[in-house]
Image (cartoon, rainbow, N blue to C red):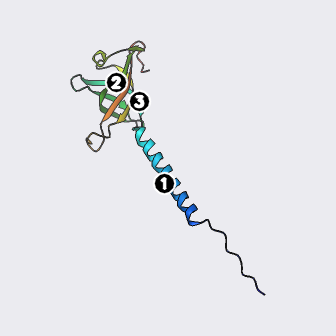
Amino acid sequence: MATQPESPARPPAKSRMWIIVVVVIVLAVFIGLRSLAGPPSHEGQGTITAIDLTARRATVEAIDPANGNRRDYIGTVAPDCAITIDDKPAKLEDLKVGDLVRVRVHSDRKAEKINGKRPMVAEMIKVTRKEGKPA
């Protein structure tokens, strides 16, 4: 008598459903945690070329690492932005045009785009006046 080959065992429908539910939950948690993390930060250095204390806005001229061209970066300074001058706590009012700075920023996802880009928000500003080099 000829025997028929056995078909591979498949998990029951309930098991497959549980696997799908678990995968969906893991993906939802991952996406939720990622959105809570906020936008990624970027650091750079340059020279302050303009400050508007009323609007809490500053312009920093820097060298674009992608192409070596000088570029102006305009952004707001968050109220909780950590500002230091020569490693001492400072305020926005203490900054001066011409200061050499190292800045950590993120793009403002809630703001409207300007020239196709989201405005930047400063999280940290380090000014170095002693040696003339950014921190």
Q: Is residue 5 left or right of residue 101?
A: right
- Looking at the rendered image, the quarter that the N terminus falls into is bottom right
Say above or below: 34 vs 14.
Answer: above
Q: Is residue 106 left or right of residue 17?
A: left
Q: Position of residue 113 (x, y in %)?
A: 27, 42
Give the label on residue 44, or none: 3
Closer to the N terminus: mark 1 or mark 3?
A: 1
Q: Residues within 10 Å of mark 2 (few under 14, many from 20)?
A: few
Residue receiving disc 1: 24
Q: Position of residue 15 (x, y in %)?
A: 58, 61
Closer to the N terminus: mark 2 or mark 3?
A: 3
SS assignment at label 3: strand
Residue at position x 36%, y 30% in the image: 62
- The Cα–Cα distance between marks 2 and 3, rounded to whole angstroms, is 19 Å
Q: Is residue 2 left or right of residue 103?
A: right
- The extreme bottom residue here reads 1
Q: Quadrant of residue 52?
A: top left
- The Cα–Cα distance between marks 1 and 3, rounded to whole angstroms, is 38 Å
Instruction: Evaluate if marks 2 and 3 touch, with contact meaning CB atoms under 8 Å apart.
Output: no
Q: Amino acid at mark 3?
A: Gly
